Image (cartoon, rainbow, N blue to C red):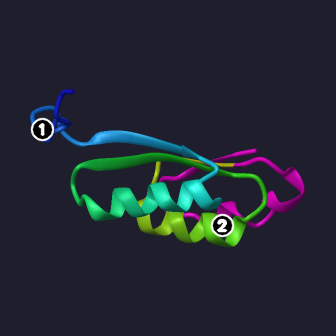
Amino acid sequence: MTAARKDVGASTGPVTVSLVGSTGSIGTQAIEVVRSEPGRFRVVALAANRSVDLLVAQACEWRPEVVVVGDPAVASGVAARLPRGTDLLV
């Protein structure tokens, strides 16, 4: 068995992370892992199907380059709530 590398991202900068389903159970757990390692990860994309309020809150915290909403019916009004510089895809 090999030990986990502790230096991932140490010499190359933060590890980029894209979270599909960021508002679900596994996605929110992944956010907690990212939050527990400040500077180690950079969230570049977040995606959710319908939970736009939590998705917007996550986007405001992590300021990703892209946010994706799977359900076009709930996408209206999301773009105005995203941080400057974050693109919305539907």
| Residue indicated by mark 1 | 7
Q: Is 78 within the magenta?
A: yes
Which amino acid, by three-letter code, is at mark 2?
Answer: Ala
Q: Position of residue 71 (x, y in %)?
A: 84, 51
Give the residue at mark 2: 80
- Judge the density around disc 1: few (<14), some (14-19), many (≥20) Cα neighbours within 10 Å: few
Q: How many marks?
A: 2
Task: Residue 5: name its quadrant.
Answer: top left
Reply yes or no: does residue 71 show up in magenta.
Answer: yes
Q: Which residues are magenta?
A: 69-90
State the image quarter where residue 20 is shown.
top right
Residue 1 in the figure: left or right of residue 72? left
Q: Residue at x 36, y 39 (%)?
A: 16
Q: Amino acid at mark 1?
A: Asp
- Please, which residue is most extreme toward the right here? 73
Which of the two marks, 1 or 2, is nearer to us in this view? 1
Q: Residue at x 61, y 60 (%)?
A: 25
Residue 55: x percent and y percent?
Answer: 62, 63
Callout 2 crowding tier (Cα within 10 Å): few <14, some 14–19, many ≥20: few
| Residue that appears at 90% across and 57% down | 73
- Relative to residue 11, is residue 76 depicted above or below? below
Q: Quadrant of the N terminus?
A: top left
Q: Secondary structure at mark 1?
A: loop
Residue 17 placement, left or right of 81: left
Image quadrant where one finds the C terminus: top right
Does label 1 or label 2 sit earlier along the sequence? Answer: 1
Q: Residue at x 43, y 68 (%)?
A: 61
Pick the residue in front: 7 or 38: 7
